[in-house]
Image (tube, rainbow, N blue to C red):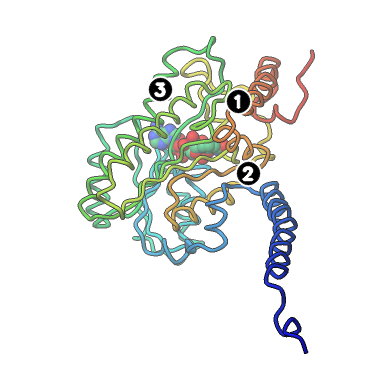
Amino acid sequence: MTESCYFSDPVKTDLKMDWSITCILWYFIPFYLLVHFVCFVFADADFTLLSSCLIGHKPETKLKGLVVWVTGASSGIGEELAYQLAKCGSRLILSARREEELKRVKRHCLENSNLKDEDILVLPLDLLERTSHEEKTNTVIQYFGHIDVLINNGGRSQRSLFLETSVEVYEALMELNFLGTVSMTKQVLPHMTQRGRGSIVTVSSAVGLIGAPLSTGYSASKHALQGFFNSLRAELTDFPKILISTVCPGPVQSLIVHNAFTEDLNKPMAIVGSQGYKMPTSRCVRLMLVGMANGVKEMWIAQQPFLLIYYLWQYAPTFAWVITDLIGRKRVQNFKSGVDADSAYFTKPKTS
Ligand SMILES: NC(=O)c1ccc[n+]([C@@H]2O[C@H](COP(=O)([O-])OP(=O)(O)OC[C@H]3O[C@@H](n4cnc5c(N)ncnc54)[C@H](OP(=O)(O)O)[C@@H]3O)[C@@H](O)[C@H]2O)c1
């Protein structure tokens, strides 16, 4: 036998290896991209948050026993937060202005969880009455001894055109959504820095990142929150166990449109269309709790096609502006012709 029968040609072997790696990459990369594309089409949150859902900590283990203060707990996202946190075994402080609604939420929490009456404190609070926030915080500390999580959720939206809206509405939006939240954080954070741990979770919005017509003041107040909390996070690097997290939901079922500011301070919303097409509140809140359990610093929560706009706005703003201009024109047209602005994305403008 010749030597070549025992030893193959090393140059040929290397070529074969290179060829097979090229083949694998040739098939693998498109397959990988296809999987990601399909995942993205069905995604209802950013990839970090969705990965936490798959492989991260479960809220049931991470949030159990924590003392969680929820503002805006009398309806919508805050109400659902109370229900899901109660099921996780968190002890709760429920705040908003309407005490009777808070008591109703508390009753529902007790009926559907293992919590006892003393595990839930109903604490009526007006975010606009900033002078009361210190006393409210002291009440919570006296009752539970500490606060693990503050969820700044209370707030109101806006449906009106800038040219028709009084400056008082802008003032009110900033007072409530921005300064009310800053004031609560100002009172609660020192207790967390003293203990060296805690979470401040703030419900911002898609329009805290993206611009939206009919919501100039609301969007500004949420952009202000984004800037505030991104800067605060960077100030707290000496406290690695303090989480500063912002949640940016797209359209979610709640009373937000019903309660929105209009062009005048005390003018109620005239038309509130069906909210059925929006993300169910329970799904939004589940994703929020997963994000909290896994220390996610910014959460994008929205169904498609809204989620796509977050990504475009972040990574390809020029495309995003074209799309938001198109959608925006339709939204304004519909608003002017009397169709609910939110459902306007999916309806034809009225012609008469
Ligand atoms: N739903 C959405 O599509 C959506 C999308 C993005 C972000 N968000 C944000 O999610 C948060 C919750 O809104 P939601 O959708 O659940 O709307 P919602 O059903 O109208 O709930 C708003 C909550 O805020 C409370 N609130 C309003 N004014 C207050 C004040 N002066 N002091 C204390 N509490 C006050 C309300 O309680 P009282 O009236 O009893 O005070 C209510 O509990 C808001 O920050 C909103 O900007 C919502």
Q: CA distance from mark 3 to mark 2?
A: 27 Å
Residue 180 vs residue 254: left or right?
left
Task: Give the residue type that dot 3 points to.
Answer: Ala
Q: Residues within 10 Å of mark 3 (few under 14, many from 20)?
A: some
Residue 157 higher or lower than 167, as above or below: below
- Nearer the camera: disc 3 or disc 2: 2
Amino acid bearing label 1: Thr
**Which percent across, then down, holds residue 100?**
43, 43
What residue is shown with label 2?
279
Q: Which residue is mark 1?
A: 318
- Mark yes or no: residue 108 visible: no
Q: How packed is label 1: few (under 14 Cα within 10 Å), some, or many (20 or more)?
A: few
Q: Quadrant of residue 145?
A: bottom left
On the image, the x and y values in percent for residue 173 come to 43, 24
Q: Is residue 69 visible?
A: yes
Circle 1: element type: helix
